[in-house]
Amino acid sequence: MVFILERDVTDAQVDVFRKEFERQGFSTIYAPGTEHKAVCLLGNTSVIDMDQVVESHSYVSYGRRVTEQYKAAGRTVHPDDTVITVGSGENAVQIGGGTFTVISGPCSVETEAQICLVAESVKAAGAKILRGGAFKPRTSPYSFQGLGTDGLALLKTAKALTGLPLISEIMNQTQLSLFEDVDIVQIGARNMQNFDLLKAVGRMGKPVLLKRGLCNTLDELLMSAEYVMNSGCGSVILCERGIRTFETATRNTLDLAGVCVLKEKTHLPVLVDPSHAAGIRSLVAPLAKAALAVGADGVMIESHNDPANALCDGAQSLDLLQFSALMDELRVRVPIEGKRLQ
Ligand code: PEP
Ligand code: MN
């Protein structure tokens, strides 16, 4: 259910209005758009007498039942792009709303020297957010599983050195408290429909990057975003990272049309991960440029100081010079697409 507010509604009135419903157990989303200001109620709204709400609040213009599936993520209630800010001061980065954000770093954190070198190098090249896996969802239990909490500590060291905000993947609810210093919590492709994890992460009060599952439709991705948003998180970033098809020439098939569909349907930022999509280093730069061309809000790219000896995903990792060369290309192309490089 959405309530459209009068144009001159004050922030204090919006606050009172939201709290009134939150006390009754509903989640609320406030969308102060350019067309109108709206408050969306999430939960079992069949019990609400919409006309009575309109009559009893002078600053509510009218109410409407939202019949579309994506009540929180859809553009019906929230037509303007959501802009998510991470980091602060000179390290503040905006994701969405006309920006193109580049996230980079290794698949896995391996050593202090490795993560610090990669962080400094990708920062110098122009990346604004550092990625690095500490808990790794590996297909084989015999593969490197990540450094765990030690990996998170090393990421913090790299952040202290460079100021870059961090993104890292959480695998389950037992790890929630470990992610306090991580700026964006990543839900990996394999966990896209781990609904309990989605709900728990949504309650953390941090931006969440939600990757599309290997075999999931765009509808399913958006419904998973609804789970996170229903738990109180308005800052969800979607990530297309390739899906499984009959094609075997690439690790996955990058669904660029899906990026366009998402941009039409949702106000949430949509990033592309060309590294996991392709699985092949030489394809990463062309696919990153393609992502920009179809309207993605940014890319997440795996980079490594020594890809040949990386403990995870070396074949798809750019070396530091290749990453820097890609950034040079993006620096030229992003403004041509009418966006601002972040
Ligand atoms: C990753 O980004 O490190 C990762 C494991 O990606 P995905 O969940 O897309 O496979
Ligand atoms: Mn990887």
Image (cartoon, rainbow, N blue to C red):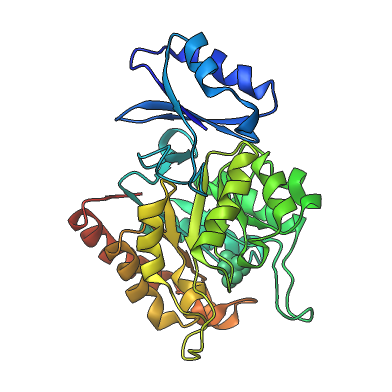
What residue is drawn where x is 34% and y is 12%?
Answer: 8
Q: Is residue 11 left or right of residue 133?
A: left
Report x, y in % for residue 181: 65, 42
Report x, y in % for residue 84: 45, 40
Q: Nearer the viewer, residue 112 or 127?
A: 127
Whether 226 is drawn above or below 281: the answer is: above
In terms of image quadrants, where is residue 213? bottom right
Q: How many marks?
A: 0
Report x, y in % for residue 320: 43, 69
Report x, y in % for residue 153: 70, 51
Q: Is residue 186 left or right of residue 143?
A: left
What residue is drawn where x is 43% and y is 58%?
Answer: 271
What residue is drawn where x is 40% and y is 53%?
Answer: 265
What residue is drawn where x is 35% and y is 39%?
Answer: 80
Looking at the image, which residue sits at the far right? 174
Whether 140 is drawn above or below 164: the answer is: below
Whether 33 is drawn above or below 336: the answer is: above
- Say if residue 182 shows up in the picture: yes
In terms of image quadrants, where is residue 168? bottom right
